[in-house]
Image (cartoon, rainbow, N blue to C red):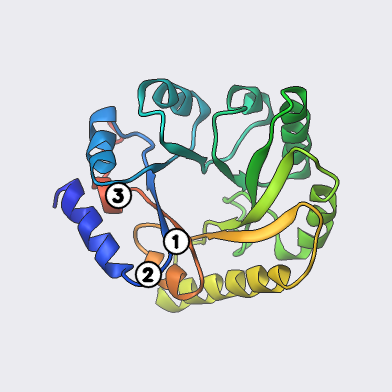
């Protein structure tokens, strides 16, 4: 299947639903990204700052860049003013560093709180039980604006996937009913190539698709 055909199939599966597609371009070449761009994709996701900066400089300027990987505090300074949405706000220390660096540039950044919904020690993100405390810290910020939630679920069967996405949906909806300063539940970013259909059924409005668009990755390159 070509990149073009893959996108046609994904869009057909989402017909009638308001769901944004983020093309996860980590490890992908500019040539591969161009094929997705030619099909109308304008949202691209990267998970390493160095790779992101290279592509930011080389690729189309009308692209919305999503940072979807773990963001180290000492790398924040390199992305200020370049990222449309940070999906991986996973600690108070990172929140404070983002606020500091964006305040210094008198700029603003939109971010999603990353939830470790499965409490998987191999994944980043905060636990549901920590959300209240985390949001209190977010309310203190003036330059970091919270726009929703993100998760990367642990692998499992269909029921396992659906259960985790449902927990996220419930959290997203519960927070959306409440009023916070500087916190707005606009985006629910969950679902990847193998499970996005289940995520969309449970309210995801941003899906992060890599192999489903570009095909299998060749990590030997």
Vertically, is 43 above or below 121? above
Mark 2 crowd level (few <14, some 14–19, many ≥20, 10 Å Cα): some
Whole-Å distance between the Cαs marked 2 and 1? Answer: 7 Å
Vertically, is 34 above or below 153? above
Mark 1 crowd level (few <14, some 14–19, many ≥20, 10 Å Cα): many
Q: Residue 27's image quarter?
A: top left
Rendering coords of residue 161 (x, y %): 47, 71
Q: Which residue does the numbered mark 2 point to in the structure image?
A: 197
- The numbered mark, 1 or 3, whose residue comes first in the sequence reads 1
Q: Which residue does the numbered mark 1 point to in the structure image?
A: 191
Q: Secondary structure at mark 1?
A: loop
Near-viewer residue (65 or 163): 65
* Residue drawn at the location 13% of the way across and 52% of the way down: 1
Rendering coords of residue 195 (x, y %): 39, 65
Q: Which residue does the numbered mark 3 point to in the structure image?
A: 211
Q: Are marks 2 and 1 in contact (CB under 8 Å)?
A: yes
Q: Secondary structure at mark 2?
A: helix
Whole-Å distance between the Cαs marked 1 and 3? Answer: 13 Å
Vertically, is 137 above or below 158? above
Q: Nearer the viewer, mark 3 or mark 2?
A: 2
Q: Residue 54's image quarter?
A: top left
């Amino acid at each position: 299947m070509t990149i073009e055909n893959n996108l046609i199939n994904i869009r057909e599966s989402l017909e009638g639903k308001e769901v944004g597609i983020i093309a996860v371009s980590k490890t992908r070449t500019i040539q591969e990204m161009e094929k997705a761009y030619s099909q109308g994709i304008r949202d691209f996701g990267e998970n390493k700052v160095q790779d992101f900066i290279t592509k930011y400089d080389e690729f189309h300027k009308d692209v919305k860049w999503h940072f979807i990987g773990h963001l180290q505090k000492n790398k924040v300074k390199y992305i200020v003013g370049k990222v449309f949405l940070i999906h991986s706000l996973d600690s108070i220390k990172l929140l404070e560093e983002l606020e500091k660096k964006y305040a210094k540039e008198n700029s603003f950044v939109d971010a999603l709180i990353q939830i470790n919904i499965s409490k998987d020690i191999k994944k980043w993100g905060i636990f549901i039980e920590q959300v209240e405390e985390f949001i209190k810290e977010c309310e203190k910020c003036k330059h970091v604006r919270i726009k929703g939630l993100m998760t990367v679920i642990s692998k499992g069967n269909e029921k396992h996937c659906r259960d985790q996405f449902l927990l996220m949906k419930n959290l997203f909806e519960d927070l959306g009913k409440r009023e916070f300063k500087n916190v707005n539940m606009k985006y629910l970013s969950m679902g990847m190539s193998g499970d996005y259909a289940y995520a969309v059924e449970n309210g995801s409005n941003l899906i992060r698709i890599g192999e489903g668009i570009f095909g299998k990755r060749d990590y030997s390159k």
